[in-house]
Amino acid sequence: MYGILAAGYGDWPIIKQIAWLLGKLMDGIYNVMDAIGIQNIGICIIIFTVIIYTLMIPLTIKQQKWSKMSAVMQPDIRKVQKKYAGKRDQASMLKQQEEMQIIYEKYGTSPTGGCLPMLIQMPILFALYPVVSNIPKYVEGVKSVYMPVVNQIMATDGFQKIMEKIGEASPVLMSPKSYDYTKADTIVNALYKFQDSTWDTLVDKMPSLSGIVNDTVSQVGHLNSFLGINIGEQPFNMLMTALHDFSIIGIIMAVIIPLMAGLTQFISVKLQPQPAMQDNGDNPMAGSMKTMIYTMPLISVVFGFTLPAGLGLYWAASALVRCVQQLAINKYLSKKSVEELIEENQKKAAKKREKKGASAKEINKMATQNTRNVTAKKKSNVSDSEKEEKLKKAAEYTKNAKPGSLASKANLVSRYNSNNSVSKEKTKKEDSDK
């Protein structure tokens, strides 16, 4: 599992570049700690985690604000969804979209308001894993500890086949199909995943390395020791050894990091605002969200036992940092009423519209003014004399119309109406004389 995850997305575009940048940060932290006489990977991981999550606070706040507004909008959104439930015709779907857009404009948000911060955070979170799981690749000070033994390994006849056989087995899990064991960086990567039993296997295959291996294991143990725990070891193996030796202290040391990872993950999720997570028929997401609250910590515990303790330490540290941040964010958001958040969102939305062009009020005003101007121009451009001239031309055209044309037929109807009107007038006059 560890090898699959480490090789899975560490070389993806964008993820690879972000991992390189984060690796430079980790290398800088290690160099600063080394300068003051502290050479410890566990402490570097904690400082690294605190810095990264502190830099992401603005995105976290933005996402939390959207979550709060989303909870307020849910009743209105569910009303619209109920109104158009089962209607799949184009007119109904368009009308539903219009009404949903009105709701988002009312609260000054957008459907993608909560997605954008998450989309920005996800590549960073994905890039954190390869950095923490393969420290020597990014931290020159740690890599230099492995290089003496790597040089002697590569000077040994048949080293490639030996390293490939050790590397494809647990706990390294680096298949020769995906990794080139003729390269020093690949061997360093594999050695970083070695545990005590793996080092013993290497010495059995290459007895001449006994002395240099002992020196390397001693230095690596110093780098990986955090509160007496070897963060390069898998807690599950540590637990099995402690149970075999009936060591109570060993058992406690083996389970402390996985349990801390699960507990801090649970507290972090519970601290997040969940006002919309009411379990009712109108909110089908409530059940799945509640399930995630309890399953995610359990997954953290399982991974904490099966992966190197350094990764469990990273998860525990990151969850603890998120807990502290969440407490501060909750206090900050509690001071803002829903009306204030809506007003802030509407102002931001108005500024975005103005950057793209004129505001909505200005556009309506300009449209009204333009319409009036056009109407006024049409009225002022045609004078009374021009109207009379056009009427005369129309009358002449009608008199000279060709026989059988629409104009000639119109003349016949006009003459008939005129003669009929005259005869009626004569009849009325004669009747009045009598």
Image (cartoon, rainbow, N blue to C red):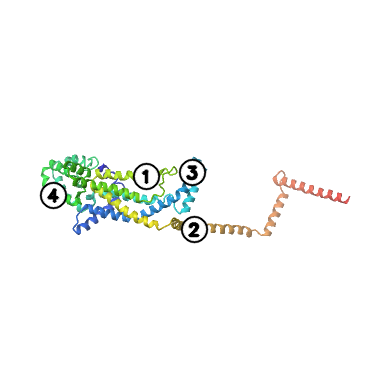
Question: What residue does disc 3 label?
Answer: 82
> What distance separates the C-alpha of mark 3 from that of mark 4?
70 Å
Q: Nearer the viewer, mark 1 or mark 2?
A: 1
With 148 as the anchor, is 53 left or right in this view?
right
Q: Which of 190 and 422 is in front in this view?
A: 190
Mark before the other along the chain sequence, 1 or 3: 3
Question: How busy is the neighbourhood of tag 2: few (under 14 within 10 Å), some, or many (20 plus)?
Answer: some
Question: How busy is the neighbourhood of tag 1: few (under 14 within 10 Å), some, or many (20 plus)?
Answer: some
Q: Which of 72 and 113 is in front in this view?
A: 72
With 84 as the anchor, is 133 left or right in this view?
left
Question: What residue does disc 1 label?
Answer: 290
Amino acid at the residue labelled 3: Lys
Mark before the other along the chain sequence, 1 or 2: 1
- Position in image of residue 79 (x %, y %): 49, 46
Mark before the other along the chain sequence, 3 or 2: 3
> What distance separates the C-alpha of mark 1 from that of mark 4?
50 Å
Question: How busy is the neighbourhood of tag 4: few (under 14 within 10 Å), some, or many (20 plus)?
Answer: some
> What distance separates the C-alpha of mark 1 from that of mark 2?
43 Å
Question: What residue does disc 4 label?
Answer: 215
Amino acid at the residue labelled 4: Asp
